Amino acid sequence: MKMKSFRRNKKGVSDVIAVLLMIAIAVAASLIAYAWVMGYLGGTTNKVGKAIQIQSMYYSGTTLYVYVQNVGTAPVTLSSVYRNGVLDTTANFTNNSPTLAINQTSMVTTLVPAGFNPTNAVDVKVVCSDGTFMEATQTIPGS
């Protein structure tokens, strides 16, 4: 008999209160996750540093023209050019200055070896003095 009265008098949390508590916990968890993700993304997107991009390549006569742009947040110094995996010692930089300011584009010219066929894909890799590099492979349009 005592057991029956105990069950009858037992009170729990109202269904409405339980739902409100679950919603509050879910909102708090989502706000914490949002703050963590935004903090992580904000920290990683500001760390671009030095970066270059090969904008285009063009072949004319015996010369291959490669247009390189500094897309980073600091000046870069171009140091070497590789064509099809081989260091190109004939590469010349615009105005003989390999340094690129932020958002500046420079033209790199290189002599192509005898027998070069511009209808085949060419792999060009431009390397900066600090190790930053960009590599592009494409079929070079000719004149």
Image: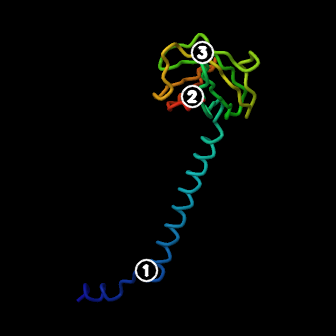
* Front one among 32 and 67: 67
Give the labeled residue for mark 2.
134
Vertical arrangement, residue 98 with respect to residue 9, above or below: above
- Image coordinates of residue 72 in percent, x first then y, are 67, 33
- Image coordinates of residue 60 in percent, x first then y, are 61, 24
The residue shown at (58%, 18%) is 81
Name the amino acid type tagged 1. Answer: Val
Give the labeled residue for mark 3.
111
Q: In this view, does 20 lie to the left or right of 43?
A: left
Disc 1 to disc 2, how far (Cα)?
63 Å
Disc 3 to disc 2, how far (Cα)?
20 Å
Give the labeled residue for mark 1.
13
The residue shown at (75%, 28%) is 101
* Front one among 70 and 105: 105
Residue 21 image label: none
- Of callouts 1 and 2, the N-terminal one: 1
